[in-house]
Amino acid sequence: MAPPGTTLSRESDTDVQVTRISTEFQLKQSLLLLATLVATVTYAAGLNLPGGAWPEDTPGGALAGDPILRETHYHRYIAFYYCNATAFAASLVVCLQLLVLPETTDRQLHLHLLRAVMVLDLFGLMGAYVAGSSRDRFTTICASVLVFSVFAYVAIAFLLYIAPRPGQEVPADQREKEHEILMVLAIFAATIAYVAGLNPPGGFWNSTRDGHTAGDPVLLDHHRRRYHAFFFFNTTAFVASLFAILLIVHHKKLNISRNWTLRFGGLYVCTLVALLGLGGAYAVGGCRDPRNTAAVFGLGVLVLVYIVLQRGIVAVAKAIKRSKITLACKERLCCKVLTGCFQSISNFFTRTRPYDEILEKARDFIQLLAVLAASIAYQAGLDPPGGLWSDNGDGHAIGEPILLTTHPARYMVFFYCNSAAFVASLAIIVMLQSASLVRRHVLEAAMILDLFSLIGAYAAGSCRDISTSIYIVAVAGAVLIYVVIHIIFTLDPGNIDDVKLEKYRQVLLLLAILAATLTYQAGLTPPGGFWEMDDKQAGHSAGYPVFQDNYPRRYKAFFYCNAASFMASVALIILLVNPSMYRPGIRCHALYVCMVAGMFGLMGAYTAGSSLHLRATIFVFVLVVVVFTVVVYLGVTKGKPRNNAQEQDGSAAAGAGQEEKKEASMPMYLMLLGILAASVTYLTGLKPPGGLWKNDDSGHSAGSPILYDIDKRRYNAFFYSNSTSFMASIIVIAFLLPRMVCQKTDLVCQKTDFPLWPMHTAMLLDMLALLGAYAAGSAREWETSRNVILMLFPMLFFVVIVFLLKKDKDEPQHLDIEEI
């Protein structure tokens, strides 16, 4: 490389530009995931505000479904609402900016704008958390102090940013993959802590009486110390996750990649603190009995012993094999069985094939879809549409789904479609390690079946009449028809090379998953909640949305915008699976049109459903106009010519690079599975199925799980299965963290290298516990729970049939790039 200040030729200019790749571009996918998940949690929080909604009309003039926080803590409500809406809009702007982010640092305007919006997004998220989660002096001081530390770090980072060191080039980071997976872990920890902080365990009081205030956490009155412990642990996890994200984004300025102390003490410690914070918050917030809290920690110890025991047995087996014992002793049956058994398990969980980049891309694509499909299906199954009965009555019992009584056929369609999507996603996740299934597109076919199950569940659970369900499904068909027509009538599609086309596909996929994740749960549980009982005089029925009766026009706007965004997103995902459709669709910009339409549908649903007052609606509308302006600006500037750097050949280091990718792929796979299980089990453990008692009557305590009192065996089955899955995920992630933050050249880190198959068996236990928790918590009859588990066998049968059909048609030795 030429020294700074010399004039470089066109050929050598590539080398300089490679060293000036921006951190934002290297972490483009991780930043996209961060922006999408921030948009997810802020969207959900905006539609279901902290403090809950009034269950019925109040003498003060508030209507059922209106936010309680607005009446009881008006200033906190205003601060939360505007901060949350700002964070939501800023996240969408970041997503759109990352679509056209330049690879090099030559176009500084894009980077300055992106960084400014990211800081605004961070401040909005922290402000919303402080305003929406704290209620008393302790929680306010605790949240303010911890969040202020993040503000201090941002100020220091800003000073470093505006004071660059002259004469130093910022090298391209070679630890991009490790930073990406740590970024994913920190993002998930931050988002689930944000959701849990705004919706604490135990729920909220829905009336002001007996010394408590409506909208305040029930746990704060009945278990103050437990609530304070939960809040401290959860807020610590939230702030530590933000610190980890900021360290990764600014790792070049802080020289983290070369400084082992900063890398270990910064990234590892922050991430580990976030995990411990989540574990502590789950233990104190997921139950009310100290014995259950101790049992949660005990489950973590058992999982830890399970992993260590496997490693110990393997070490003993290897010692026996290497020892100088006589041949007769080595051939004893116990030694042969021990070594043979564990060698078979190790070979099963270890990839022996050479690294195949195209195969890994296909695996990552399927894994991302399966992980998010499993997460939304798990939550929807435990918190079904229509709500839960709050009392016993004719033909129903407290804690049972209202929809099961009022619309049994519709509920069964929703339940089994949603359960099929969840079980299929778990099966796909477990079978992803089979290269033959991925190479023959068997799991992609299963993933499409998974998506159609989600469509069926959404159509059945989001409305109460057949005509509306038909309309919802028709929207997906209309999107597919539009894309085909657009492709046919585009005479001169753009010329995009395969590398850029795959990058555009990844971005479109992530945005489509964002919209589908947001709108699925929002459509099944709309803002304002559901009526809990029939009232013929008032004209409403149990299980119907409160929002629909009190604000019919706003509800229609929310419902149709949300449904259009969900169906457009799912149709887009289906198109992105098929290369013969997504290649011409991207080149003629048909898929871009669908994605932009889905994003505007998302913003329309947020505008209609997040606020019932004119001033707040105008504020959100202004934010929508800002996002639209950014879309137009980026669309105009995207077409301008740029001097892009040519890609380096890099063939000399190809062999070593492929080997490193092969070794890093398995820890990343296990880490993502742990993140999935930890995220869904954390939130459902704090808000168990069956609902919570709303008052102190008949021997039970407000805020305690209803299922614990009406069916203790079922509750224990759910609680311990869910807790086992959560603790196993946290421990597996903690074991994998040293491998992610340490380099093989670090002498201190070489001791952390251990076989991965014990982690894999622990993750298999994790997935089985997750399936058991879903089966126990999503139904109230043991026969139904049995049917959920038995649904796994038709899924396996489908995979076997498709595999056999593909086996005769496809070449198993080769995977063409055109197939993916």
Image (spheres, helix red, strand yellow):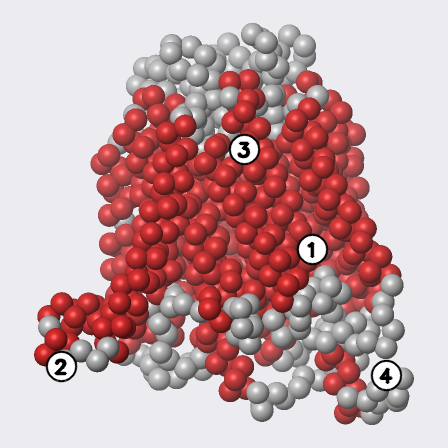
Q: Residue 51 appears at what percent x and percent y?
A: 61, 25
What's the amino acid at mark 3?
A: Phe
Count neighbours of disc 2 (C-alpha within 10 A) and say few if under 14, some if 14 to 19, many if 20 or more. few
Which residue appears at 84% of the width and 64% of the height?
109
The residue identified by callout 1 is: 246
Count neighbours of disc 4 (C-alpha within 10 A) and say few if under 14, some if 14 to 19, many if 20 or more. few
What's the amino acid at mark 1?
A: Leu
- Does residue 550 appear to the left or right of 680 in the view shown? right
- 113 vs 410, nearest the viewer: 113
User: How far is disc 2 from disc 4 in space, using C-alphas?
Assistant: 67 Å
- 189 vs 388, nearest the viewer: 189
The residue identified by callout 3 is: 230
**Is residue 421 something one can see in this rendering?**
no
Please report whichever mark, 2 or 1, sits nearer to the chain's N-terminal start.
Answer: 1
What's the amino acid at mark 4?
A: Pro
- 752 vs 383, nearest the viewer: 752
Label 2: state its secondary structure. Answer: helix
Tag 1 and tag 3, C-beta contact below 8 Å: no
The residue identified by callout 4 is: 4
User: How far is disc 2 from disc 3 in space, using C-alphas?
Assistant: 59 Å
